[in-house]
Amino acid sequence: MEIIAHPREMQEQARRWREEGRRIAFVPTMGYFHQGHLSLMEYAREIGDRLVVSLFVNPTQFGPTEDLDRYPRDLERDTRLAEEVGVDVLFTPAAEQMYPPGYQTYVTVNGLSQGLCGASRPGHFRGVATVVLKLFNLVMPHVAVFGEKDYQQLVVIKRMVSDLNLPVEVVGCPIVREEDGLAMSSRNTYLNPEERWSARCLYRSLQAAQQLVADGKKTREEILSTVQQIISQTPHTRIDYVALVDPETLQEVAAVQGAARLALAVWVGHTRLIDNTLLVET
Ligand code: PAF
């Protein structure tokens, strides 16, 4: 595995691979790998013949009071894990190279970025869309793989790719969970043992919603009130949002008709966790 830190070197490598006719698969990450990241890499390795993983804690997607400085980092461990999965290039640019002095260009995906996480994290998706477009220009992937845990992010990226005619196929992969159902996230490391116990309520509430729909209770009111009740009865939690939305437009829906995404963000102690699931009418 090669580690490339310089954006221009990354682009040159990508260009060489393209000239050789290689299909480049790409997994963008902020590092501190867990099984969720590794599953994206394993999938990407199967669908391309060169695999690039970027590791960049992108400052423009963090708000001023958010956890940029304490975001977990372990380059040595990440390097070892990426090597074990069969990554060809680990791309690790520095913030000064991605955003040199004088930098002033940003990408905004308007409507889709505004609700859900965008409402409590203004500017977040602008930072995400900007860095992902920059990474696409440097890695020049044929296909890029994202996790469905950040469901709104996946929808925003797909919209950007379509709106800007980017020659990249965007693929979403299923959420990977701990044994008790907690969606894997680098931020789970912030939780103390009591909070970690409480955090199980996110997945329990999603499962309860799935059961409701299976029992024919499909209205937004029925679903949201059950989810809210399960979470609010759990110590150390505070709901940021719970929403039932159309899977593509992310607009609120009145009931599960066909399919809907149930998405939530919950503070557990000082840690904000997100999760979601597809609810399908049976
Ligand atoms: O999902 C993430 O880890 C980040 O938002 C991404 C896509 C790597 C952009 O910084």
Image (cartoon, rainbow, N blue to C red):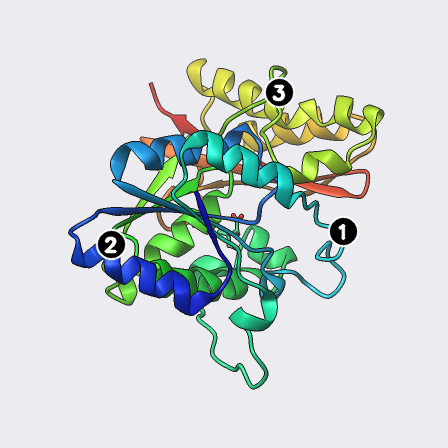
Residue 110 percent location from the top left of the image: 44, 67
Q: Which mark is residue 204?
A: 3
Q: Is residue 200 above or below residue 139?
A: above
Q: Residue furthest bottom?
A: 102
Q: Earlier in the sequence, mark 2 or mark 3?
A: 2
- The circle on residue 57 is none
Does label 1 or label 3 sit earlier along the sequence?
1
> What type is the residue that disc 2 sits on?
Trp
Image quarter of residue 95: bottom right
Q: Nearer the viewer, mark 2 or mark 1?
A: 2
Name the residue: 75% across, 30% down: 232
Three-letter code, disc 1: Arg
Residue 140 lies, with reference to residue 236, above or below; the image says: below
Look at the numbered disc 3 and give the secondary structure of its residue: helix
Is 124 situated left or right of 139 in this image? right
As drawn, the label of residue 70 is 1
Residue 227, above or below 76: above
The residue positioned 28% from the left and 65% from the top of the image is 163
N-terminal label among 2 and 1? 2
